[in-house]
Image (tube, helix red, strand yellow):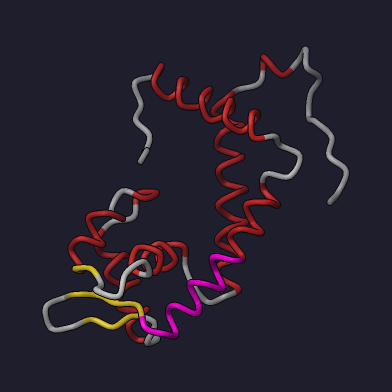
Amino acid sequence: MDTFTYSHSDEDLPDQPIGYWASAAGSAVVHHIRTTLAELGVTQPQWWILSQLVAGDEGRDRAAVLATLRGYLGVGDGPLNHDINALRERRLLAEDAGGRLRVTDAGRALQAEISARQHKLRAQIHEGVTEEEYIQTLKVLQRMIHNVGGAAWHE
């Protein structure tokens, strides 16, 4: 990996705006993930859909999948329905007459390939960051969100 240099000295960093840096980090990471997914012909919402369905052979109701994914990065039902239909057209998903969605064998293979690539992406994104630093960063960001009355997704 390239040599990394911090933008400011430790003395100057406390004066840097958290909104800028949090947004810049989010944008850079999401762009990197979406670019990698696009190389495999999948959007981020399509990846979420496949991941929601791959766990079981019994499938899930379309409405349940929509309800679970509705809040991810502000994606609504319209785009999610479009992505479900696109996955069906590619024969990565099957849907029965009752609206129950199941991942096909081709969908399972693609999901497995993406999952393996996601593990490599995570390692790349976290390079040079200890687990303790990562945990502390998330705690700081969550506290700042709370301090301004915001809400963040959590499981």
Q: Position of residue 114 (x, y in %)?
A: 55, 69
Of all residues, the one furthest to the right in this rendering is 3
Up the image or down, 14 lies above or below 103; here it is above
Region in magenta: 104-116
Q: Main secondary structure of the magenta part?
A: helix
- Residue at (58% x, 28% y) in the render: 137
**Residue 105 lies in the magenta stretch:** yes
**64 relative to 84 in the view: left or right:** left
- Residue 132 horizontal/vertical position (percent): 64, 29
Q: Residue at x 20, y 60 (%)?
A: 64
Query: Is residue 131 rendered to the left or right of residue 79?
Result: right
Residue 130 % position (x, y): 70, 34
Is 146 placed above or below 24 here?
Answer: above
- Indicate the position of residue 83 as horizontal and vertical percent values: 35, 71
In this rendered view, identify the residue nearer to me: 154 or 86: 154
Q: Quadrant of residue 62?
A: bottom left
Q: Nearer the viewer, residue 141 or 52?
A: 52
The residue sitting at the left extreme is: 98
| Residue 83 in the figure: left or right of residue 41 | left
Q: Residue furthest top?
A: 11
Residue depicted at 55% across the width and 43% down the height: 26
Q: Quadrant of residue 37?
A: bottom right
